[in-house]
Image: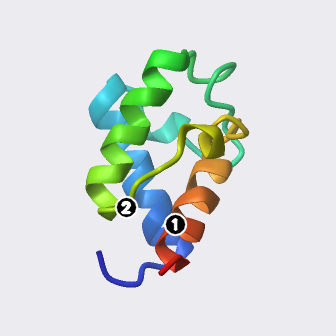
C-alpha cells in the first residue's frame, strides 16, 4: 500500500464498512461512532481489523484497536500503522 492521505484512508475504511457490514456509505462519516451509530460489536471490530490488516499488509495489535470508538479513530490508527517502519 503506497502513501495514502487521510481522505483516501477514510474512503478505504468506509468501503470496508460498507462491504463487510452492508452499511450505507452515507451513514459513515469521520465522527460516526462504530458501536452506537453503526451498531457494530466486538466481533465486527475483529472482522474490520482483519480486513485492514489485509489492506495495509501490517499487523494490528488488538490492544491498539481497543481504544477505537469512531471512524476517525480507525482512520488515525491506519495512518499511524502506515507510518511505522
Residue 23 falls left or right of residue 70: left
Percent from the top left, x then y, of residue 35? 64, 21
Specify whether 16 is left or right of 28: left
User: What is the spatial separation of the Cα atoms under label 2 and label 1, in whole angstroms?
Assistant: 7 Å
Q: Earlier in the sequence, mark 2 or mark 1?
A: 2
Q: In terms of depth relative to the viewer, which is nearer, 41 or 14?
A: 41
Q: Estimate the x, y position of residue 79 in percent, counting from the top left.
A: 55, 69
In the rendered view, does 70 fall on the left or right side of 22?
right
Residue marked by disc 2: 58
Q: Which percent across, then down, holds residue 41?
A: 54, 15
Q: Is residue 17 above or below residue 22?
A: below
Compared with residue 34, is residue 50 higher up or lower down, i.e. above or below? Answer: below
| Residue 40 can be seen in this image | no
| SS at mark 2 in the image | loop
Q: Secondary structure at mark 1?
A: helix
Q: Residue at x 35, y 35 (%)?
A: 18
Identify the residue under disc 1.
81
Q: Residues within 10 Å of mark 2 (few under 14, many from 20)?
A: some
Q: Nearer the viewer, residue 15 or 58?
A: 58
Amino acid at each position: 500500500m503506497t502513501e495514502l492521505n487521510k481522505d483516501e484512508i477514510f474512503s478505504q475504511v468506509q468501503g470496508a464498512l460498507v462491504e463487510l457490514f452492508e452499511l450505507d456509505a452515507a451513514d459513515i462519516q469521520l465522527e460516526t461512532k462504530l458501536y452506537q451509530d453503526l451498531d457494530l460489536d466486538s466481533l465486527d471490530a475483529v472482522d474490520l481489523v482483519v480486513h485492514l490488516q489485509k489492506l495495509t499488509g501490517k499487523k494490528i495489535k488488538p490492544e491498539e484497536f481497543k481504544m477505537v470508538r469512531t471512524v476517525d479513530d480507525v482512520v488515525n490508527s491506519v495512518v499511524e500503522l502506515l507510518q511505522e517502519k
